[in-house]
Image: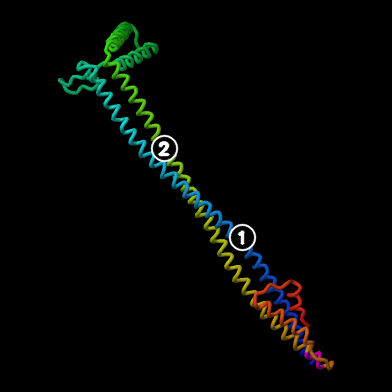
Amino acid sequence: MDELKTQLEERRKMVDEKATSYRTVRDECNDNSKKFTATRNEMNSEVRELIVQVREQREIREQMNEIVREKKSVRAEANKQVRAAKDALDAAKGPEAAPSRNEGHRGRRDRPETIHSLRRELIRLENEFEMGRHTGKNETKVMKRMKDISAKIQKMKISEDSNTDLKESREALRIAIEAQETAHAAVEQAAGAAQEAHDLMLQWNKEVDTQREKAEAAHRKLRNSKKEADKNHRGYIVSLRCLHSIQDMLRAMRGASSGEGQRPSARVEVQDLMGKLMSGETLSTEELMQLQRYD
């Protein structure tokens, strides 16, 4: 009998340690589950906010793309006005301003002289003269050419100033070019805003994927933690049942040797606590310890 008591006592201690280990691991898993739940919910909340940002940027992008299309139509019309103004200016200059094509294409030699082209040539010659590229007889020749160019420019300016149609055509061309540049700037601005919204949308989309992956990772950890908690809880319940069975046998053996019976009130109280535990109720630390101390 004594040997049996000794063996039962050893088994009771072993089962008690297992029950304590199962309870400890289960409680740790439950604590982790709470943390993973909070992390998952936080990540999901951020995902929802980011999705709102993505939608907003998509709407802005679509609005700006529509504006781009409108501005391009305005620019296209401005381009037409510029071409029309150039044609009107060419007509105002008269047939003598048009290049001769009787002798075929000869490149720049066939182009008419204009105030702009003459000024460009004059500036080039002045720069070359300052750099000392024309000396001796060539210097005299270049200086004569510069005087001739200046005289031509002055003569053409006087002629153009007296030509009302030409002045009006030049002014119309200037206004058309300004409108064209304004329209082009508006297109560039709207296109830039659309591209910025598109880039932000892609950035928010990438962030959505990142946060969603974090939420899914937290959810996977939550499932694993719950599984581990359930497994250890089942082990804890089985350990308690084994522990109570051993304690019942030890109590019965002590009662038989002393002529006393078991305490029914203690047994009923333990059964009530086990019933609560099995039904999923949360027991206090003291109640859990009482289940293991049942003796």
In terms of secondary structure, what is the magenta stretch mainly? helix
Task: Residue 266: name its quadrant.
Answer: bottom right
**Marks 2 and 1, the one that precedes in the sequence:** 1
Task: Residue 67: name its quadrant.
Answer: top left
In the image, taking residue 184 as reference, residue 101 lies left or right, namely left
Q: Is residue 275 visible?
A: yes
Q: Position of residue 198 (x, y in %)?
A: 44, 45
Number of residue marks: 2
The residue positioned 49% from the left and 48% from the top of the image is 203
In the image, taking residue 103 as reference, residue 47 lies left or right, namely right
Toward the viewer: 170 or 108? 170
Q: Position of residue 12 (x, y in %)?
A: 74, 82
The residue positioned 59% from the left and 71% from the top of the image is 227
Task: Residue 268: name its quadrant.
Answer: bottom right
Q: Is residue 83 above or below residue 264?
A: above
* Residue, far left: 102
**In magenta segment, residue 170:** no
Quarter of the image with the C terminus in it:
bottom right
**In magenta segment, residue 255:** yes
Q: To which residue does mark 1 refer?
A: 38
Q: Which residues are magenta?
A: 252-256
The residue positioned 63% from the left and 61% from the top of the image is 35
* Cα–Cα gap, marks 2 and 1: 43 Å
Q: Is residue 138 visible?
A: no
> Tag 2's secondary structure?
helix
Q: Position of residue 188 (x, y in %)?
A: 40, 35
Q: Is residue 17 above or below residue 260?
A: above
The residue positioned 34% from the left and 22% from the top of the image is 174
Q: To which residue does mark 2 refer?
A: 190
Toward the viewer: 289 or 56? 56
Q: Amino acid at mark 2?
A: Ala
